[in-house]
Image: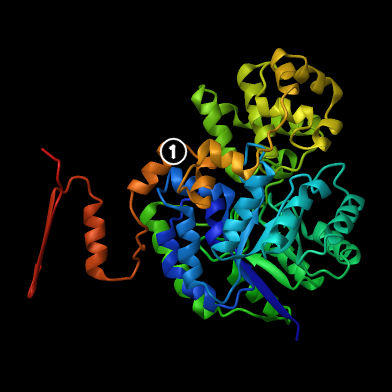
Amino acid sequence: MEEIHFVDTTIRDGHQSLWAENMTTGMMLPAAKRLDDAGFEAIELISSSHMKKCVKELKEDPWDRIRLIAKRITKTPLRLIAGRVNTFEITPESIYRLFIERMAANGMRQARISCEWNSISGWQRKVQAARDYGLDPILNLIYSVSPKHTDEYYAQKTREAAAFKPYRLCLKDPGGLLTPERTRALVPLIFKHGNGIPVELHTHCTTGLGGLCALEAIKLGVKSINTAIPPLANASSNPSIFNVAQNARALGYATAIDEDVLKPVEEHFTIVAKREGFRIGAPVEYDYAQYLHQVPGGMVSNLRHQLKRVGKENHIEDALEEAARVREEFGYPIMVTPLSQFVGSQAAINVIVGERYKEVTDQVIQYALGLWGEEGATTMDPNVKEKILSRPRAKELAKWVPPEPSLHEVRQKIGGPGVSDEELLLRWLLHQTEIDAMRAAGPVKEYVTVAHPLLTLLEELTRRTECNRIHIEKPGMSLTLERKGRD
């Protein structure tokens, strides 16, 4: 009987998709040992976007997150999402390599590598860095829908990726755009051109088809599926481990996972979601509009926010339609970070200003100049490109060359004696005031969700702003809590 394996995405993509990366390290810690014991092939933990979120909003040291989780997850390889270090800035080679080296030194064992253009040049340095520091590279073949993303395109990209001899190839569907039909077309093609390299599937449930596509991939020979644990599965997240495993067994496959070990993890994160007001993932209905604009779910909320700031929130449908037009004019970039943000932001600007391309961002000018990938500049609509590059700001940016400082030069500029490599990377990503505020918040505190009636009562009472004083008394115990600083 063939056995299906799983990669867990709960504490990385799950909360990135559904909780806006708001899962704290303390929330992860109680679940870590069970994740390690469940039989996953790998566990995704962190990406570069989580680094900034940890420091700026959660007031946590992301390096502590990796170290603390690595102490509890000792059997299952921890996986890094190794894209850009700073999403909206072009990262020097010295910084990228230091980032990978520090990730490996702190416990990461695999790197799932993306290039937003599926290009050889975008993969090459990342694969080399991963190998140099002992990480197994997994190369993403990012799925998209457009006139140029054909079967022939994916056959060629598979051959190019396989030439690097990565640990794995991953058919990555960040927008949840895969259908069972396209899965049936692409999976055999990837096997045919993949030179025997194992293949895994990473898809989302944005259009309601993620679970079906996972089953189609399994039937076609894919032995490794990326899944999440409810309540951090479904919706814009990844398929549920419980659902995919159950259906795989119904098809006659064995599943290398202990679901009983994971049930308390589901209970833990469900309690967290309800307490904190976080979204609980649920299956969604099929939405054909997603295939037209292809704006990722998280970005739709950002578009609404942009429009709301100028009193045009009711123009969201106009912005989504405009995003489809802008994407076509930009040469059909794959709608992943940062390209999806370039398309979405420009669409919002066009709607807000009322005249297309009257105003553009510096990133869009850089895109037209080829600084975010030569393919973007060469496939862009010539008339739109001319309109973007005819302004004075474009002439300024055309003279700019992305700097490639050495690590020594970076250290001289923002480091200094006694500054660790990890601190240096934080300084590269963030302002010193943000780092100082994070340090001042103190160490990570483990999040308690044990079903103890007294703890539950105390937590509920302390959340009530009208309570200034709480007194609990029973034989052998007396407890008083008093809120300070109130009239």
* Residue, disc 1: 432
The image position of residue 486, as x and y in percent, is 13, 40
The image position of residue 452, as x and y in percent, is 27, 71
The image position of residue 458, as x and y in percent, is 22, 60
Q: In which quarter of the image is the N terminus?
A: bottom right
Count neighbours of disc 1 (C-alpha within 10 A) and say few if under 14, some if 14 to 19, many if 20 or more: few
15 versus 218 height, above or below: above
Position of 432 with respect to 248 (left or right) is: left
Extreme residue in the front direction: 417
Element at badge 1? helix
> Can residue 313 be seen?
no
**Which of the 4 image quarters holds residue 224?**
bottom right
> Can residue 177 be seen?
yes
Front one among 132 and 159 = 132
The kind of residue on which mark 1 rests is Gln
The image position of residue 169, as x and y in percent, is 78, 63
Extreme residue in the bottom direction: 1
Q: Which residue is drawn at 14% across and 48% down?
A: 468
**Which of the 4 image quarters holds residue 378?**
top right
Q: Which residue is drawn at 72% across and 45% down?
A: 288
474 versus 27 height, above or below: below
225 versus 235 height, above or below: below
Q: Which residue is drawn at 73% across and 29% down?
A: 401
Q: In which quarter of the image is the C terminus?
A: top left
Position of 90 with respect to 484 (left or right) is: right
Q: Residue at x 69, y 17 (%)?
A: 393
Position of 89 with respect to 195 (left or right) is: left
